[in-house]
Image (cartoon, rainbow, N blue to C red):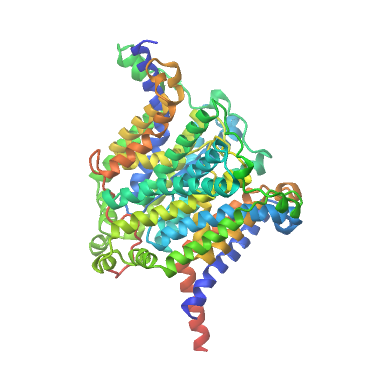
Amino acid sequence: MGFLEMLYFIIPSAILYATPLIFTAIGGVFSERSGVVNIGLEGLMIVGAFVGIYVNLEYASTFGSATIWMAMLAAFIIGGIFSLLHAVASISFRADQTVSGVAINLLGLAVSVFLVKMIYDKGQTDMIDQTYAINRFAIPYLEDIPFFGPLLFQNVYSTSILAFAVAIGAWFIIYKTPFGLRLRAVGEHPMAADTMGVKVNRMRYIAVVISGALGGLGGAVYAQSIAGNFSHATIAGQGFMAIAAMIFGKWHPIGALGAALFFGVAQTLSVAGSGMPYIQDIPAVYLQILPYVLTIFALAGFIGKANAPKASGQPYIKGKR
Amino acid sequence: MSNRVINILVPIISIIIGLIVGAIVMVVSGYDPVQGYSALWTGIFGDSYSIGNTIRQITPYILAGLAVAFAFRTGLFNIGVEGQLILGWLAAAWVGYAFDLPKVIHLPLALLAAAAAGAFWAFIAGFLKAKFKVHEVIATIMLNYTALYIANAVIKNLSDGGFKTERVHVSASLRSPFLRELTDNSSLHYGIIVALLMVMVMWFILEKTTRGYELKAVGFNKHAADYAGMSVNKNIILAMTISGMFAGLAGAMEALGTFGNASIKPGFTGIGFDGIAVALLGANTPLGVVFGASLFGSLKYGALNMPNAAGIPEEIVSIIIALIIFFVASGYIIRVALQKLSKKKEGQ
């Protein structure tokens, strides 16, 4: 395999693996920017993956070619609703946000597998019909551009385009709108925001629900494009990797996008690297641990300092200094 | 109502609400909760075989709970028990089969290796926190996956491309024919004694030593401890290391007792995360951890009887456990409710 061919294989595949991470990591950005740590993204992705596969399997004949979008929409909504549990516990009931997140992870997995066993009477669902999966396509004209055509436009997934749009949209919302300013304010200094008339808890509720919806969306995308079915092991660490991408991207939507793409490359190489020259000499384990080790380095300040929003992790209690 | 009573009431109320919501879930899903809970009960206490296996299940839960609780008491959140446990598991299994030694040396050595492996992995997180201010929650999550992949790669290497290591030698095994016979061939092993010993160790460190006092002081108020001349950084690192030691031993229980080897895992064991639930329910005290581990260990093992005896997916118990964590974590609201309730009574 020549270098160009390798590149033509790695880049589209990396974007495929990165797409669910982008959605989920952007969700994490919203939540953490408002001051609520969301370790529960893994559980929210699991719920989203289950809902996505369920809608796809049950309603493919009804929705036809719109199936993936309906499945993603359902996962988006259910993910948002499910994250309300985290919001209520950590914002209104002042629960430890990490503990509540851990509970979301346990609950998401348990509920999803419980429902699979109840509905299908076995531990995993059937595979979805390939015609109703998220499939790649080529963009006419653009695919003919030399180098960039095969690199970016011959194997495109519509969900990847959506992911880029969501990242740019999130950047615009967080940095260019009054809503975004308030969001960042309640995450950095909730008391100051409160004094200025910003409803701290309401902002946080909205942010957590956005993160749940995007996490659910990420799960549905992963299940319908990469996994193809749902079982207890469908989502195994993607949620935590999205958290890693969020941190590595320094709590910034575009940064998270870049980090997710980079982790996508690492995942591609660890899955398919055994057939490539040079890459096959690197033990897969190095590529598997790369995202996590890099995130630790980023936090330790070796790769630019990553600072969490100041009020992240603390419930806001009116009148308490 | 005194604070002490409320502290005990919060977990109990959480358990009761958890079980009630679990019953509601069963009804809504078209299952019979009475049948479900009686299947759960038989799964735990039905015969000596079940009891033996329930205790076996409780064993690593105690140690994982101690790991989380010890860190909590010192102001740290060790969410990385899972990774420390996996490395402890691997280390114990390796020492267990790679050496030929008399039992009095071999078994303690294997346990020590597991404790050291877990301690080392947690030490990294403690060091990062002390030196670079890296939040331990994120660091330990990242270290969990790192440990999982490293352990899998090492197991593959050790077994020449296979998926599990050789079995540990009898001289390093925690298994006992006596306990097996006593419990009708269950996989009960001597690990429970190790776990209970560690409960005492944690109590002793925290309550009876100067170091334990310092560790707790740092947990209560970092700045006050610093002002009093205690080294906060040193205590953070030490606290994580001790916590990781407990976690590593939890892995040794699986390596030397329950499974007798280490195998490649597609994902986490879940024991580490359940350890968080155990510690929370036990209010981070050594004795509380024993109760928490007994409850969650029993539920987890008893649940395996539910699909056969009542046709209910065993995940219902995981749902209940997750709900209990929610309620305990939201203890603030239960406290408020209890205080209002007791005030009303006093007013009458």
Q: Quarter holding the C terminus of chain A?
A: bottom left
Residue B215 visible, this angle: yes
Residue shown at 71% from the left, 56% from the top: B51
> Is B207 on the left or on the right of B231, as rendered?
right
Q: Quadrant of residue A98?
A: bottom left
On screen, A191 above or below A294?
below
Residue shown at 74% from the left, 48% from the top: B185
Residue shown at 44% from the left, 60% from the top: B70
As drawn, the residue found furthest toward the front would be B102
- Along the line of sight, which residue is nearer the eye, B218 or A222? B218
Q: Quadrant of residue A119?
A: top right
> Is A10 on the left or on the right of B19, as rendered?
left
Residue A108 visible, this angle: no
> Is A67 on the left or on the right of A22, as rendered?
right
On screen, B191 above or below A270?
below
- Along the line of sight, which residue is nearer the eye, A104 or A196? A104
Can you give x and y, in whole percent of width and height, for residue B257 in the image?
Answer: 62, 47
Can you give x and y, in whole percent of width and height, for residue A231 in the image?
Answer: 58, 37
Q: Quarter holding the N terminus of chain A?
A: top left
On screen, B203 above or below A311?
below
Residue shown at 52% from the left, 30% from the top: B158
> Is A162 on the left or on the right of B192, as rendered?
left
Can you give x and y, in whole percent of width and height, for residue A161 in the image?
Answer: 37, 28
Q: How many numbered circles does the render carry?
A: 0
Can you give x and y, in whole percent of width and height, for residue A240 in the image?
Answer: 42, 42
